[in-house]
Image: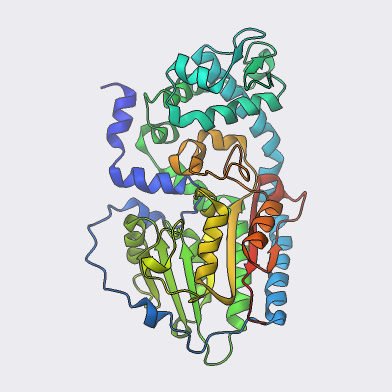
């Protein structure tokens, strides 16, 4: 058995499913739960969502409380934006982008393309001539566009890309160690042709420790979760006597963001729906948060109308979506489904990657869900939207208020992640 076969053998089906979801951008704070073998869950008790989400005495989000939530988020963003580890990551981003271009270039060399000046290639041509899997057509286009940005390729009107000079250039070659050059040239090309699974590339030896650690410890995720907690804490403090708060998390995954929010809620006056498209993750959430009686679990595909899936319309005061909505096929359609769930004046808390970083070419950019998008007029090359584009999409869909917390030019802005709030009509 060669080293690639050995790595493949070490990846269990559960780990593949779990890590595929994490690499889409979800945080993973539950290291212990993720490492333990997931036992076959006992049948979950049936949830009467109509009763659990009954209107009753629910909070009225007045203008004053909305403004207090926005101010709390702004204050926390300012406090966290100067954290030394966050600013250090931002400083490194330019060199990370440059080295990423080197890795892409050496993969093209392995494929035998763009190896002389004026070598012209189309995406379809590279797929056909080099044995690249057709599902990676968007991946290939992103790689070529990255080299256009570097001035190494030129894009023609006939959709061909033309080499200005052979790639990688000596300058790019110098950015890689011999070990990196060998690893990225061989393995990136092998992922494109289907010789190895993307997770084998991310997880040499089958170990998930480095991925789990990065999603737990990465400064930018601490920044996002801290802002989210500050905003929700303000809402919880403003909860009128006798009122209760109904929250639903879309695509909750391993519960990283969930874990930062649940301690802020008054258990006796809250109901929290932990949802995901996959039963694997709702079972994982049930295992992790089983001591919290106010948390319930149910599968939800937010790409489809939630009401036929058993979720009452206008039944949620808050919806949380952390690093997940970009993975849907049509943003406008997805936002309509979220509005269908929100009560008048309800809040959407949105955590999203807002800039495509070149390092995504070696991580979540390979995964099928990342390139699930079909609204090419809004997202022509990759599924990520800037904060300004999210504002436009949210207001177009029918939200009436919008706030964003990452300051232009800040470390978080350089790293391309933001926390946003949007409010449904009504309630004031």
Residue 163 vs residue 315: left or right? right
- Residue 287 vs 173, above or below: the answer is below
Q: How is the image coloured?
A: rainbow
Q: Could you tell me if residue 280 is visible in this image?
A: yes
> Residue furthest toward the bottom?
241
> Where's the N terminus, which quadrant?
top left
- Residue 363 vs 166, above or below: the answer is below
> Residue furthest toward the top?
116
Tell me residue 339's x, y (percent). Answer: 55, 67
Q: Quadrant of residue 383?
A: top right
Q: Which residue corresponds to the image point at 72% horizontal and 81% vertical from the top-left?
A: 64
Q: Which residue corresponds to the image point at 74% horizontal and 61% vertical from the top-left?
A: 78
Q: Which residue corresponds to the image point at 39% horizontal and 56% vertical from the top-left?
A: 277
Residue 340 vs residue 285: left or right? right
Foreground of the two, 85 or 264: 264
- Residue 209 vs 403, above or below: the answer is above
Q: How many marks?
A: 0
Q: Which residue corresponds to the image point at 62% horizontal and 41% vertical from the top-left?
A: 356
Q: Quadrant of residue 60?
A: bottom right
Foreground of the two, 336 or 65: 336
Foreground of the two, 393 or 417: 393
Tell me residue 232's x, y (percent). Answer: 59, 72
> Residue furthest toward the right?
409
Q: Could you tell me if residue 84 is visible in this image?
A: no
> Where's the C terminus, which quadrant?
bottom right
Tell me residue 65's x, y (percent). Answer: 68, 80
Tell me residue 326's x, y (percent). Answer: 54, 50
């Amino acid at each position: 058995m060669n080293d690639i076969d050995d790595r493949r053998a070490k990846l269990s089906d559960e780990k593949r499913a779990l890590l595929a979801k994490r690499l889409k951008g979800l945080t993973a704070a539950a290291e212990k739960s993720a490492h333990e073998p997931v036992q076959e869950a006992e049948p979950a008790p049936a949830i009467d969502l109509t009763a659990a989400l009954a209107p009753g005495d629910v909070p009225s989000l007045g203008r004053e409380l909305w403004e207090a939530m926005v101010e709390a988020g702004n204050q926390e963003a300012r406090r966290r934006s100067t954290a030394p580890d966050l600013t250090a990551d931002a400083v490194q981003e330019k060199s990370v982008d440059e080295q990423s271009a080197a890795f892409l270039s050496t993969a093209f060399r392995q494929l035998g393309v763009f190896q002389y000046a004026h070598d012209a290639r189309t995406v379809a041509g590279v797929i056909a001539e080099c044995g690249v899997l057709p599902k990676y057509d968007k991946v290939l286009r992103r790689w070529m566009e990255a080299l256009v940005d570097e001035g190494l390729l030129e894009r023609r009107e006939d959709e061909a890309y033309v080499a200005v000079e052979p790639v990688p250039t000596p300058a790019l070659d110098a950015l890689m160690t011999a070990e990196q050059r060998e690893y990225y040239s061989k393995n990136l090309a092998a992922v494109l042709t289907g010789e190895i699974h993307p997770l084998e590339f991310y997880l040499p030896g089958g170990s998930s420790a480095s991925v789990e650690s990065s999603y737990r410890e990465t400064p930018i995720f601490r920044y996002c979760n801290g802002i989210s907690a500050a905003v929700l804490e303000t809402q919880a403090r403003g909860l009128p006597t006798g009122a209760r708060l109904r929250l639903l998390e879309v695509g909750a995954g391993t519960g990283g963001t969930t874990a930062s929010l649940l301690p802020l809620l008054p258990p006796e006056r809250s109901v929290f729906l932990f949802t995901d498209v996959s039963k694997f993750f709702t079972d994982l959430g049930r295992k992790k948060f089983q001591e919290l009686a106010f948390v319930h679990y149910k599968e939800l595909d937010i790409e489809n109308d939630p009401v036929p899936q058993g979720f009452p319309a206008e039944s949620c005061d808050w919806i949380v979506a952390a690093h997940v909505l970009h993975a849907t096929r049509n943003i406008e359609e997805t936002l309509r489904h979220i509005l269908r769930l929100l009560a008048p004046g309800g809040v959407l808390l949105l955590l999203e990657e807002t800039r495509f970083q070149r390092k995504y070419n070696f991580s979540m950019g390979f995964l099928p869900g990342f390139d699930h998008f079909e609204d090419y007029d809004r997202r022509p090359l990759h599924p990520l939207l800037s904060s300004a584009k999210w504002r436009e999409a949210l207001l177009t869909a029918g939200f009436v208020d919008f706030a964003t917390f990452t300051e232009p030019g800040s470390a978080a802005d350089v790293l391309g992640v933001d926390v946003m709030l949007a409010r449904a009509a009504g309630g004031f």
